[in-house]
Amino acid sequence: MAIADALQGSLDLLVLKILSRRAPLHGYAIMTSIETLSGERLRVEEGSLYPALHRMEESGLIRGTWTTKDNGRRLRVYDLTARGRKELAKEESRWTAVATAVQRVLRLA
């Protein structure tokens, strides 16, 4: 299984975690943060990230606002909501339990 396949299903968790520590961020900064913090092992494509950001915004996990850079370019930046913080805690706990179980099988099999 490719590492990119492992990202499937964990994108929301990664975005929430990045925003919990570094918000507000625009989409490209979220993508590069995931790549950098993963030691260049995880890469998120725009075609996956932006639909996820829109879905997460619609569900109230993140809040998007428009900002204008010094050069006049408008950017949409994202921040975590209270609901997003609760979801992050729940998903981190779930992911840790799954990772622990997988590690246990790998050690004992």
Image (cartoon, grey):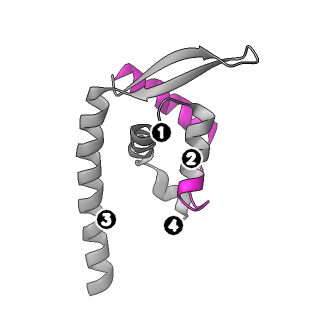
Disc 2 or disc 1, which is closer to the eye?
A: 1
Residue under label 1, please give it.
22
Image coordinates of residue 21 in percent, x first then y, are 42, 42
Disc 4 or disc 2, which is closer to the eye?
A: 2
**Which residue is rendered at x = 43% and y = 46% of the image?**
14
Q: Residues within 10 Å of mark 1 (few under 14, many from 20)?
A: some
Identity, as a three-letter code, of the amino acid under mark 3: Ala
**Which residue is rendered at x = 59% and y = 54% of the image?**
36
Query: Where the C terminus falls, by quadrant?
Result: bottom left
| Residue 109 shows up from this direction | no
Identity, as a three-letter code, of the amino acid under mark 1: Arg
Residue 53 included in the magenta stretch of the image? yes
Disc 4 or disc 1, which is closer to the eye?
A: 1
Identity, as a three-letter code, of the amino acid under mark 2: Ser
Residue under label 4, please give it.
1
Q: Tell me, yes or no, whether the two marked residues, 2 and 1, touch with CB atoms within 8 Å.
A: yes
Give whichever of 14, 65 is nearer the camera.
Answer: 65
How many angstroms separate mark 2 from mark 1 (CA)? 9 Å
Image coordinates of residue 73 in percent, x first then y, are 72, 17
Would residue 25 be found to the left or right of residue 69 on screen?
left
Name which of mark 4 and mark 1 comes first in the sequence.
Answer: 4
Residue under label 3, please give it.
99
Q: Tell me, yes or no, whether the two marked residues, 3 and 1, touch with CB atoms within 8 Å.
A: no
Q: Which mark is residue 33?
A: 2
Residue bounds of the magenta highlight? 36-59
